[in-house]
Image (cartoon, helix red, strand yellow):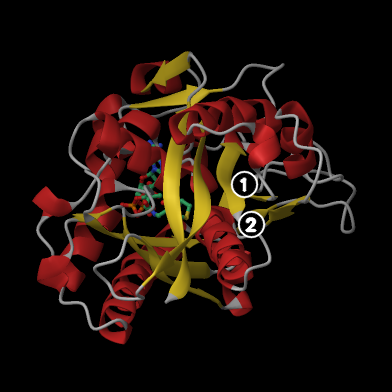
Amino acid sequence: MTLRSRIIGIGSYLPSHISTNDDMAKIVDTSDEWIVERTGIKVRHFADEQMSSSVMATYAAQEALKAAGISGNDLDLIVLGTVTPDKTFPATAVYVQSALGMKHGCAFDVVAACSGFLYALKTADNMIRLGQVKTALVVGVETLSKITDFKDRNTCVLFGDGAGCVVLQAQEVQGTTADRGIIDTLIYSDGSYAPELCSTGGPSTNHDVGYITMNGREVFRHAAVNMAQVSAEILQKNGVDLSEVDWLVPHQANIRILEATAKRLGIPMEKVISTVDLHANTSAASIPLALAQGIKEGKIKEGQLLLLPGMGAGFTWGASLIRL
Ligand code: ACO
């Protein structure tokens, strides 16, 4: 017998304000036709002035805790992925900890951009496997609209805000791929690509939060390759055939990246959860938001095998293999 992290609750939150492509065309020189054709995005949600990342994360967490049938004080750990923290410090996770009434354990952030949820998941899963914690909340949350340059049409149409999370709990299992829970997670980074997608600012460089800046073509080129490669690697490592995977739940950057990843991997688009039209790119929040949406739509069901690849600034990338 071995310890594995089982997902016992999933939650999501999207701010109520929806911005259409036509709304974006009033701000920059773009069109619904261009955005849909190049990205697949139709709408995105934007947080208002008062809505911080911790507030959105707390709403999502409350939904997940309710689904799990536990309270905030039952959590031993919160790991939160974001590049849009409430403040430079302390960690956004501690605001969530306080809002959920969690009085023990620990809460901290990880910064891995669009791979943030996978990095957070791996961290929490490792601590559960080691027996250090029993119950953990893993969050991906972003208020990207607050670091978006709304004068730059190359980036401003691509991003949205939102939060998604899972509650993990330690379970004794045989340790096979038939057992429910997180089977494996792989994470990677290559810092030589940091300039291709980054913020223009930072506390220790120019005392500024900065805006998103990106070499779109370079990101595109690597995204599909890396996500397909790491997906194939995690399947091979765990002796799982691609045909056994029920759903690919990838980071939602761009429908063309999703299609290229699926094609390289050899999985049909019918098995790919796509929410890029509804949410745009919500970075660390995109995978758990897609997971939650897939469940709400009745596509993803308990016991199914899920493959979650992601790729983002750093470059960072990774994949998680989960029996829900
Ligand atoms: N509306 C209209 N025209 C635009 C817009 C816009 N919003 N943005 C750029 N253009 C123009 C460009 O200026 C360019 O015009 P030019 O030829 O006169 O110079 C033209 O469209 C073509 O630009 P390209 O960069 O070649 O367009 P491309 O087909 O590569 O699509 C895009 C651009 C959508 C950014 C694509 O490169 C992409 O999706 N890259 C991945 C980026 C991404 O998803 N980043 C998210 C973060 S990382 C991640 O999540 C993996």
Instruction: Judge whether 185 appears above or below 31 on screen.
Output: below
Quadrant holding the N terminus: bottom left
Name the kind of residue labelled 2 in the image.
Cys
How many marks do you count on the picture? 2
Which numbered dot is residue 198? 2
List the residue tagged with mark 1.
212
Under circle 1, the secondary element is: strand
Compare residues 3 and 86 and report the one nearer the observer: 3
> Residue 243: percent from the left, percent from the top?
10, 69
Asked if labels 2 and 1 touch by Cβ distance under 8 angstroms, the answer is yes
- At label 1, the amino acid type is Ile
Q: Position of residue 306 (x, y in %)?
A: 27, 58
Asked if residue 225 shows in the view, the reply is yes
Could you tell whether 285 is left or right of 226 in the image? right
The answer to whether the beta carbon of the residue marked 1 is less than 8 Å from any atom of ligand 1 is yes
Q: Residue at x 43, y 38 (%)?
A: 10
